[in-house]
Image: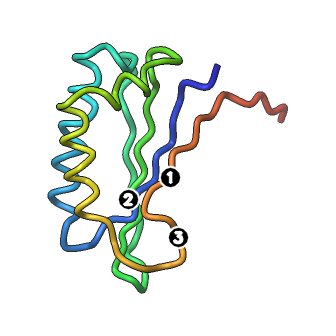
């Protein structure tokens, strides 16, 4: 069961502040709806690329296998996702968003 998600976004540099504000609302609403675990999300941003897109990473844990589907049907989450979509960096080789479900990998050292 892969409940940890690494979401990447390519955000216009002029929209980064607004996008950060949306991220600040995103997880708390998901948590209020019990769609994510209590583990706090992690956020990362990189340097703007030649296309003006800033890579932003959001890592969080869904609370169940059906939580992502439930999120897609909730108006408050849909509103955030729709606003995010207005902030994507146009063009470029990388997709504007990706979502990768992952699980821990034991590695011996």
Quadrant that contains the C terminus: top right
| Horizontal side, residue 4 vs residue 69: left or right | right
Whole-angstrom CA distance, mark 2 to mark 1, is 15 Å
Local crowd size for mark 3, using a 10 Å CA cut-off: few (<14), some (14–19), many (≥20)? few
The quarter of the displayed image where residue 15 is located: bottom left
- Tag 2–tag 3 contact (CB < 8 Å): no
In the image shown, does 60 or 97 lie closer to the viewer?
A: 97
Residue indicated by mark 3: 94
The residues tagged by marks 1 and 3 sit, at their Cα atoms, a distance apart of 9 Å
Would residue 1 appear left or right of 63 to someone viewing this image? right
Of labels 2 and 3, earlier in sequence is: 2
Q: Position of residue 96 (x, y in %)?
A: 43, 63
Which quadrant is home to the N terminus? top right
Residue 10's spot in the image, x, y percent?
Answer: 39, 64
Label tally:
3
> For numbered disc 3, what is the local secondary structure?
loop
Q: Which residue is mark 1?
A: 98
Q: Quadrant of residue 14?
A: bottom left
């Amino acid at each position: 069961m892969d409940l940890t998600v690494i979401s990447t976004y390519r955000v216009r540099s002029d929209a980064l502040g607004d996008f950060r504000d949306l991220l600040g609302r995103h997880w708390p609403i998901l948590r209020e709806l019990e769609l994510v675990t209590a583990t706090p999300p992690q956020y990362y941003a990189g340097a703007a690329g030649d296309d003006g897109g800033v890579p932003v990473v959001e890592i969080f844990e869904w609370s169940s296998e059906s939580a992502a589907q439930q999120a897609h049907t909730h108006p408050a989450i849909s509103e955030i996702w729709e606003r995010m979509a207005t902030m994507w960096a146009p063009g470029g080789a990388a997709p504007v968003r990706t979502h990768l479900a992952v699980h821990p990998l034991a590695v011996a050292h």
